[in-house]
Image: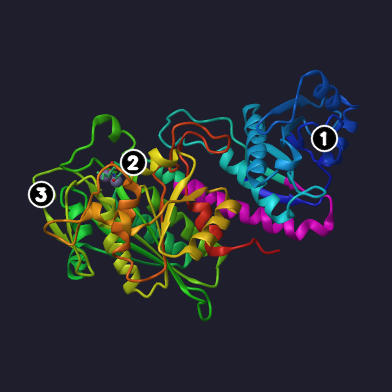
Amino acid sequence: MIISVLNASITDIECDAIVVNLFQGVAAPGGATGAVDRALDGLLSRLIREEGFEGKPGQTLMVHTQGRLLAARVVLTGLGEPEKLDLDTVRRASAAALRRARDARARRVATIVHGAGAGGMAPARAAQATVEGAVLGTYEFLKYKSEPQLRQIEELLVAEMDASRLPSVEAGVSRGDVVSRAVNLARDLVNSPANEITPSALALLATRMASETGLEALVLERPEAERLGMGCYLAVARGSQETPKFITLRYRPEGKPSGRVGIIGKGVTFDSGGLSLKTAESMVTMKDDMSGAAAVLAAMQAVAELRPDREVLAIVPAVENMPSGSAMRPGDVVRAMNGKTIEIENTDAEGRLTLADALCYAAREGCEELIDLATLTGACVWALGRVYSGVMSNNQELVERLTECSRLSGDRIWQLPLSEDYRYLIESQVADMKNTGGREGGAITAALLLSEFTEGRPWAHIDIAGPAFLSQDNGVIEKGASGAGVRLLIEYLCGEPAA
Ligand code: BES
Ligand code: MN
Ligand code: ZN
């Protein structure tokens, strides 16, 4: 989708459809919607009255202009109650409108910025959310469909009448474009099957991204990982025919960096469970077990474009978890880079093994702050469902900052306690700890294991197992891979869109 900003009234744009909005409980449309209504001789207000259009979020109404405007159609989209307006509603309204226009075969669509009217939100944020809703809402994964898809919006024009607002709207639109392309990259990677997205494929993608963007890629092969003592990560790789790839991507700002953050993504390209084999049913979506990796790599694409002033080191310990004659066994004891030992009780608790070494590596590389994203536990899905990711951390201030970024970005996170009171559950008879703590509090015991490898750094673990892969459309993101965590990471690393 090609996106641009136009200093014009929405009524003066020639295109297949224009998008305007309506708050719930408003009978007479004002602003841009009022202008469109007048151009159509009151048709919109008449339809609002007579067709029961209430302006609820997600609700849309489409009319043909019959030549009374340069645009062929008008899509009216609901903004909900004015007091409840937030960035998520804007994304939802924009997504619903663009889907409606697309389904009517529109190719060139113009929209106003939703939610930035009098007393509304900051124009840059509202513009960003409008674009995110449009691009994320019309995403379709068609790579493996042999019939070409005809319906696709090619061009989005964001109309802003007020010239004084143009710089902010342009900044927001441009940020929305960068962010939603990154989110959709992550979705493509996760939706793609595990026979295509192998550890080697992820390594190739990272290397390619580096050469295209100026990031630095470094992929550690098995012998190098052995030399570094990454016994936990390598144990997971043992059962698979796929070669493990310990992938790193580094962004260096110009001048002296104002800090160094490590972002680590779980990259299990397929999780069969290993010898502790999953059931057929629970294995079906396990191509999504590299969602953390996809989020981290996609965020790096955006970081390369937005150029924040902190150094960012992205780490993806990519492996496939398979059963075979060479696979790790329950009862095996493995040793991580920092010398700590883990008894493997269940080979299906593999993510924490790969992350243990990745966290050690990040700390050794001088990262002052660590954030990991992982589809780590079914327990987190049971606790929070598919809406919120769980966040567990050794640093409350980091959680507060991430929570604020969560609110702005729409990637929801909810804190669970990282309490030592659960530590007894991962005590091992033979090693420093064991890799499972039973069903109860499973998200927390997994995080407690990870905390043993953070080397005293401020660290936050985000368990995205629920939101990473949706079983139902949520009004912006269709069923399937969601790109969970990408928006949060970009917001955290790059901050406000600057005009
Ligand atoms: N990848 C899974 C977690 C998962 C479950 C992600 C459902 C997405 C949806 C992880 O590797 C796993 O298998 N965890 C086990 C741990 C258990 C054996 C302690 C789990 O949660 O069942
Ligand atoms: Mn597993
Ligand atoms: Zn897994």
Q: Say which label, 3 or 1, has the lower sequence index.
A: 1
Q: Say which label, 1 or 2, has the lower sequence index.
A: 1
Indicate the position of residue 32 as horizontal and vertical percent values: 83, 40
Q: Residue furthest front?
A: 421
Residue 16 in view in this figure: no
Indicate the position of residue 357 as horizontal and vertical percent values: 27, 63
Amino acid bearing label 1: Leu
- Residue 147's place in the image compared with 257, above or below, is above
Residue bearing mark 2: 378
Residue at horizontal 58 percent and vertical 34 percent from the top: 475
Residue bearing mark 1: 70
Question: Is 60 contained in the magenta span?
Answer: no
Indicate the position of residue 384 as horizontal and vertical percent values: 44, 41
Q: In this image, 25 relative to 88: left or right?
A: right
- For discs 1 and 2, the disc positioned in front in the rendered view: 2
Ligand 1 is in which quadrant of the figure? top left
* SS state under label 1: loop
Residue 358 in view in this figure: yes
Indicate the position of residue 366 as horizontal and vertical percent values: 37, 75
Q: What is the crowding at mark 3: few (fewer than 14 residues within 10 Å), some, or many (at least 20)?
A: few
Question: Is 168 contained in the magenta span?
Answer: yes
Q: In this image, 446 relative to 11: left or right?
A: left
Q: Nearer the viewer, residue 439 or 155?
A: 439
Q: What is the crowding at mark 2: few (fewer than 14 residues within 10 Å), some, or many (at least 20)?
A: some
User: How many angstroms separate mark 3 from mark 1 (CA)?
Assistant: 67 Å
Report the colour scheme.
Answer: rainbow
- For discs 2 and 3, the disc positioned in front in the rendered view: 2
Residue at horizontal 40 percent and vertical 72 percent from the top: 367
Residue bearing mark 3: 326
| Magenta segment | 158-186
